[in-house]
Image (cartoon, rainbow, N blue to C red):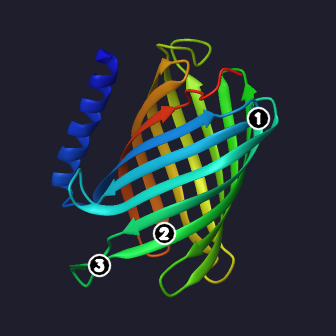
Amino acid sequence: MKVIKALAVSVFILATSVVKAQKNDLGAWYMYFGNNKISKKLNLHNEIQYRNFDAIGDLEQLLIRTGIGYDLTENNNNILLGYGFILSQPYVNGQKTENIEHRIFQQYITKQKFGRFNIQHRYRLEERFLKDDFRIRFRYFLGFNIPINNKELTPKTFYASAYNEIFLHFDRPVFDRNRVYGALGYVISKNMRIEAGYMNQLQENKNRGQIQIGFYNNIPFTKN
């Protein structure tokens, strides 16, 4: 637990100091991801992301996602149907506004392992119901987790994490955004880990960095 606290405190101090220095050009995202088996083949996905314009207190977006997944092969090749609720509070002409989005999504995740490299591909299709608009978006995520002090991602293992994710609209403009991420993680137990890092998000007219702290919970709801 000392390792986890030290990791979290260090990243929080870094986020706070950098945000102050850069006049809120750097945001902070605090994230919880649950992927819990409810049977041998089925899993429940549950996710909360609290995104800030600064270190804490100035809400940019609250994102809640859930869904039911099914493993096509043992613990791999998962297809999932999900729903997302997104509350956004962007600044428009210096004034804070509020937007609510409802989102249906379908995804396919496949995992591979090459030596120490744990690789994940995620293909996601989103139907986005906004206040005055409806859009369809495709996302492709390529992620890597690489253990550092052990050969496998076993408890008490530090690991390096990285991903790239591209977002594409089905109409114009086709390009929506691209995210590049790097982090240091720690495996707490067989079914829990924590991760802290930096993500850069490139959009058509802006480029912004985010400090991210994520907690991952894979404790199964079944003994099967």
Q: Which of 97 and 25 is in front in this view?
A: 97
CB contact under 8 Å: marks 3 and 1: no
Query: Is 121 rendered above or below residue 165?
Result: above
Q: Please report the residue visible at 50 percent of the width from the left and 74 percent of the height from the top.
A: 204
Residue 105 sits above or below residue 90 on the image: above
Which residue type does callout 1 highlight? Lys
Disc 1 secondary structure class? loop
* Residue at 16% from the left image edge and 53% from the top image edge: 20
**Residue hosting label 2:** 203
Residue at image mark 1: 41
- Per the model, the C-alpha gap separating discs 3 and 1 is 42 Å
Q: What residue type is labelled 3?
A: Thr
Query: How many callouts does the rendering have?
Result: 3
Task: Report, in whole angstroms, how far the alpha carbon at label 3 lies from the one at label 2.
Answer: 20 Å
The quarter of the image holding the C terminus is top right
For residue 80, side relative to residue 2 (left or right): right
Calculate the distance from the C-alpha at mark 1 to the C-alpha at mark 2.
37 Å
Mark 3 / mark 1, whichever is N-terminal: 1
Residue highlighted by disc 3: 97
Give the residue type at disc 2: Gln
Element type at marker 3? loop
